[in-house]
Image: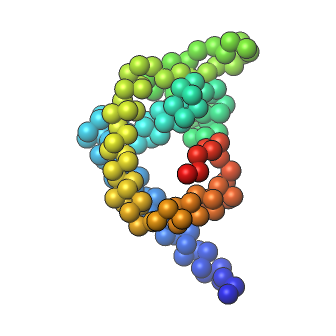
Amino acid sequence: MVKSPTDSVRAWRQLMHVHAAVTSELDERLRREVGISGSWYEALVEIALAGETMQMNEFARETTLTKSGATRFVDRLERAGLVERVSCPTDRRVWQLSLTERGKALQHEADPHVLAILEDKFGRFLDEDEAQAIFEMLTRMVPSTVTTSR
C-alpha cells in the first residue's frame, strides 16, 4: 500500500503533539521536584552521555542550538554551578563542558522522574519491537551520536 502525503502529515502532527505533551509534563515536574527545567536536564544528560565532558561545538549540535545560543545557555548552566568550562588538553583553542558534582547530582535526582513520565506517556504504549522500530526510523531521519539501541 502506497502512503499518501496526508499520512506523513498526520504522523508528523501526532509526533509533535506527543512531544509537546511529554515535554510539558517533564518540564513542570522537574521544576517542581528538582528545581531545574526540562531543557537544563536535557543538557546535563547530553554531557553525561558524552562521558561527562563534551566540546562546546558538539553540545551546540546535539542540543540543536546555534553557537551563540549554546554559549548563552551554557553561561546560565555555569552560573548555576551545574557545568564548568575547561580547556581541551589536546587543543587549547577548544573549550569543553564538564559536569560539576552538583550537575551530576541534579541529573541523577531527576532521572527517576523523567523515566516515570516517559514510561507513562510514551513507553507503555510500545512493545520492545515497536520501540526499536521507532528508534531505527527516527535515527535514519536524523542520525545521532546516540549508539544505544537495545
Can you tell which quarter of the image residue 69 is in?
Answer: top right
Residue at (67, 87) in percent of width and height = 1
Residue that lies at the very extreme toward the bottom in this rendered image: 1
Q: In this view, does 120 lie above or below 72?
A: below
Q: Can residue 60 be seen in this view?
A: yes
Colouring scheme, one of rainbow, by chain, secondary structure, one colour: rainbow
Q: Can residue 24 be seen in this view?
A: no
Horizontally, residue 38 falls left or right of residue 1, namely left
Q: How many marks?
A: 0
Residue at (47, 33) in percent of width and height = 44
Image x and y of residue 30, in percent: 32, 41
Q: Is residue 16 above or below residue 74?
A: below
Image x and y of residue 28, in percent: 31, 47
Image x and y of residue 94, in percent: 69, 19
Residue at (34, 52) in percent of width and height = 117
Horizontally, residue 139 falls left or right of residue 107, namely right
**Along the line of sight, which residue is nearer the eye, 40 or 137?**
137
Q: Is residue 47 above or below residue 142?
A: above
Can you tell which quarter of the image residue 3 is in?
Answer: bottom right
Image x and y of residue 70, in percent: 57, 33
**Along the line of sight, which residue is nearer the eye, 20 or 66?**
20
Q: Is residue 65 above or below residue 93?
A: below
Can you tell which quarter of the image residue 136 is in?
Answer: bottom right
Residue at (61, 44) in percent of width and height = 146
